[in-house]
Image (cartoon, grey):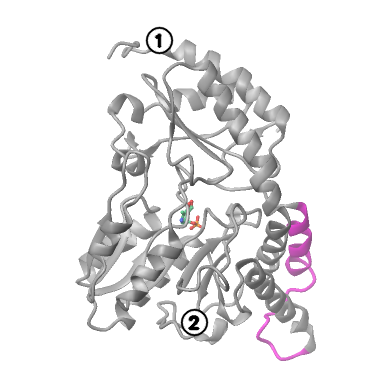
Amino acid sequence: MSEPLIYLDNNATTRVAEEVFDAMAPFLREEYANPSSVYPFAGPAAAAIAKGREQVATLLGAKPEEIIFTSCGSESDNAVLRSAVKTQVGRRRILTTCVEHPAILNTCRDLTQYAGVHVDYLSVDSQGRIDLDEAKALINEDTAIVSVMFANNEIGNIYPIRELSRLAHAKGALFHTDAVQAIGKVPVDLQNDLTDVDFLSLSGHKFHAPKGIGVLYRRTFAPFATYLTGGHQEKMQRAGTENVASIAGIGKAAELALLHIEEENTRVKALRDKLQAGLVATCPDAIVNGDQEHRLPNTLNICFKYIEGESILLRLWDRAHICASSGSACTTGSLEPSHVLRAMGLDYKALHGTVRLSLSRYTTEAEIDTALEVLPPIIRNLRELSPFGREE
Ligand code: PLP
């Protein structure tokens, strides 16, 4: 593309880091052996898998043998929930939240329909926060697994995983967290901090590795039954010839994530805060969504009342090739407001004018300045055209 792109949609996906690309390249070219083969030519491929496993384990404070490579975050989420209803014999409930990613919500729905499971959903308040007392009341001897996301992809809220995992274990339930959005943005320490987490999902493309590679962390001795049967790969926990290049890539991305975590929480956070403060100051009726005290450092979810998020996105692209997301999902031709914002009880006029801007370590101050220049006039102009006007 000729014009520069301003990519503020890093919760959707991220660009592959150069170092990650370089780590992958040999396995897409000359080192193409099947890592399970016995001849020496397969050695580098097998070694790349072992190295990737160690790098991911180091990022999480885990042991290498606790890392299972999968194809994506959605697969890891599916694997855990489907496994728990098999291994937790006699327990027929799952506890999750109403603001999870569809990878969890639709898997729960499927298990309700076809596996006779009952799912309880934690509610959220107007800032998207859950209530630990509600969790305590809902976890019981029939709960097979509690699955709560580490951080929300839309509003960036960070949830109290340590406390929730303790509550789950106190009742003999397993605990899983979908940490797809947290990895690389906030520290995750499974060895010293989150010692009651049994399973954790992550996805390479959210932290500068390619799409199509994920990880399922399984704590040693946590009961697990695979749903992807076949060969002996991943110690028979996930069949299928390994995606060697992407495993090398996610390993390198994990190493880089550790190096950049401080920058994420200082420079990137400062840029996000500058963007937020600038928009709130220049756009009347702009409301920041989510829990501003416990939020990912890169995420800003902001609603501009009385206008459509999609119109904002189109103009952002037209004016300055800025990529962002709205709070609506395009389903069957209609714009369905996000289930997260609806669960928070946002009113209709606010729901539709929501935009998510998400930064990364590649975001520059000049890009944020451009967004701050371009966005306020777009909002003013759309409001002038809006049938809702500014009247309540
Ligand atoms: N969980 C969360 C919180 C996500 O944000 C996403 C992707 O957006 C996923 C799961 C699914 O990950 P993948 O795209 O790797 O399947």
Under tag 1, what secondary structure? helix
Seen as rendered, the residue at the extreme top is 384
Q: Nearer the viewer, residue 28 or 268?
A: 268
Residue drawn at the location 74% of the way across and 80% of the way down: 47
The residue under label 2 is 237
* Quadrant housing residue 246: bottom right
Residue drawn at the location 77% of the way across and 63% of the way down: 23
Q: Nearer the viewer, residue 300 or 158?
A: 158
* Quadrant housing residue 321: top right
Q: Is residue 212 above or below residue 283?
A: below
Seen as rendered, the residue at the extreme bottom is 38
* In this picture, residue 239 sits left or right of residue 33: left
The quarter of the picture where the C terminus appears is top left
* In this picture, residue 88 sits left or right of residue 284: left
Residue 89 x, y percent position in the rendering: 26, 84
Disc 1 crowd rating (10 Å Cα; few below 14, some 14-19, many 20+) is few
Is residue 365 among the parts visible in the rendering? yes
User: Which range of residues does the magenta coloring cover?
Assistant: 18-39
Image disc number at residue 385? 1
* Quadrant housing residue 198: bottom left
Residue 370 x, y percent position in the rendering: 66, 23
Q: Nearer the viewer, residue 267 or 334?
A: 267
Disc 2 crowd rating (10 Å Cα; few below 14, some 14-19, many 20+) is many
Amino acid at circle 1 = Leu
Amino acid at circle 2 = Gln
Q: Is residue 178 above or below residue 322?
A: below
Image disc number at residue 153? none
Asked if the beta carbon under badge 2 is closer than 8 A to the nearest atom of ligand 1, the reply is no
Specify whether residue 87 is painted magenta: no
